[in-house]
Image (tube, rainbow, N blue to C red):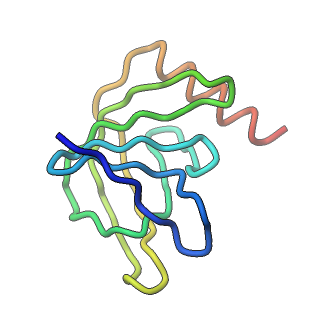
Amino acid sequence: MSARKLSNPGSEQSPITAAARQARLSLSHEAVFIQKSGIEFRSPTAFSAWTEMTVELRTPDNGRVNCTGVVIACTGNKHAGYHVSMIFTDMSRQAQMRLQQMSSARLD
């Protein structure tokens, strides 16, 4: 398996890394908007609706939160980038608490 860095429109260094041929993402906490049941993020690559993914969120303290989810919406185009909405389908209680902390920290 190989991984490649996806370039983000308007950014020199992307916070998104996708693994080839597998629905796996690695996202920086700065690249996502965390909601109660999922996340939203911008991507230079489109994702099909109902695509299952494993997402690794990198936390501000260099930790990691792993989640499994499904893409429910992907809008945009290849020139401006895509806005991806994803809901979580399987999360541990610990991961839920960590995401809640990350979300609260962004509001401060």
Q: Is residue 99 left or right of residue 19?
A: right
Q: Is residue 20 left or right of residue 93?
A: left
Q: Is residue 52 left or right of residue 42?
A: left
Task: From the top left corner, tell me how far across and down residue 103 is, in percent.
Answer: 66, 36
Which residue is drawn at the image coordinates 60% and 30% (left, top)?
Answer: 59
The quarter in which the C terminus is drawn is top right
Query: Which picture quadrant has residue 91?
Result: top left
The quarter in which the N terminus is drawn is top left
Q: Is residue 20 left or right of residue 5?
A: left
Number of marks in picture? 0
Task: From the top left corner, tell me how far across and down residue 90 is, in percent.
Answer: 29, 27
Task: From the top left corner, tell me how far across and down residue 73 is, in percent.
Answer: 33, 64
Task: From the top left corner, tell me how far across and down residue 9 is, in percent.
Answer: 54, 74
Task: Judge whether 102 appears above or below 18 on screen.
Answer: above
Task: Judge whether 25 appears above or below 68 on screen.
Answer: below
Task: Judge whether 48 appears above or below 96 on screen.
Answer: below
Query: Which picture quadrant has residue 101?
Result: top right
Q: Nearer the viewer, residue 25 or 5?
A: 5
Which residue is drawn at the image coordinates 47% and 20% (left, top)?
Answer: 95
Q: Residue furthest top?
A: 94
Task: Judge whether 53 appears above or below 44 on screen.
Answer: above
Which residue is drawn at the image coordinates 48% and 13% (left, top)?
Answer: 94
Q: Nearer the viewer, residue 19 or 27?
A: 19
